[in-house]
Amino acid sequence: MEPPRLGRCMDEASILCNSDQKGEDAAHQCSTVLAGARKTQRHYPDYEIKYCESEKQVVLIAISSAVAIILLTVLLYVLIGRFCCHSKSKHPDEKRLHFGNGHLRLPGIRTYVDPHTYEDPSQAVHEFAKELDASCIAIDKVVGAGEFGEVCSGRLKLPSKKEICVAIKTLKGGYTDKQRRDFLAEASIMGQFDHPNIIRLEGVVTRSKPVMIVTEYMENGSLDSFLRKH
């Protein structure tokens, strides 16, 4: 059974004691109410204090929850704003056209670059091809001859990677500057394409001799040879 609230009893006592009744009946009635209030206070001395404390706790919890929600909302807004600004500034050049080195770049489109527009062919080839260490390449045998020299089959073993079979084009000795430029231009052209139907360039060797172009190994040989056989 819920104990009566002391505050309410005292209010009723005040009302009765301040009534318009006079005489002994009024005095007796007021004394009875006050005695009941004192009795209630003796039986439940801490009830009113605990009730007030629980009300304060509810108010504090509500205020704390509201403040936490506001802070989380502000923090989320700041993080989203920073992310959007970072993504916009990460690639600012993609929103406008580019023109340089004799080629035009369109936003979102990978365009072909003519390697002959570079004064130094080595600069062009190193922009589109990876320089390989000659010690990572093992030549097995000669499988043909090309415009610039021999074509060999071999193996490429890069650090922390699996060994793969490759085709190796070499630049013959006694080459002219034009032959070297054309040889490196071929590698620069191949390095700009990444398609399953186009032979993949693995890298080049330009800092030691012989100069080499290393590509994936095509077991069926060149396309024209394959078509003639079939």
Image (cartoon, rainbow, N blue to C red):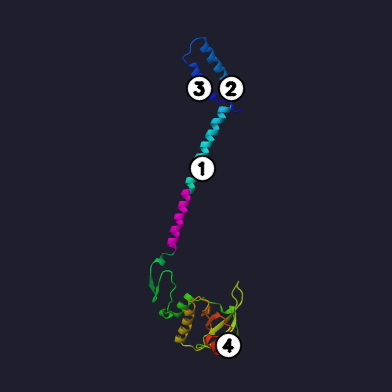
**Residue at image x 55%, y 32%?**
53
Residue 65's tag is 1
Q: Amino acid at mark 2?
A: Thr
CB of mark 2 within 8 Å of CB of mark 4?
no
Q: Main secondary structure of the magenta part?
A: helix
Mark 3 / mark 4, whichever is N-terminal: 3
Q: Which residues are magenta?
A: 73-90
Quarter of the rendering occupied by the N terminus: top right
User: How far apart are the alpha carbons under marks 3 and 2?
Assistant: 13 Å
Residue labelled with disc 4? 143
Query: Residue 10 at x, y = what percent?
Result: 52, 21
Residue labelled with disc 2? 40
Residue labelled with disc 3? 11
Q: Amino acid at mark 3?
A: Asp
CB of mark 1 within 8 Å of CB of mark 4?
no
Q: Badge 1: few (under 14), some or many (20 or more) residues near its Cα, within 10 Å?
A: few
168 to 64, vertically: above or below: below
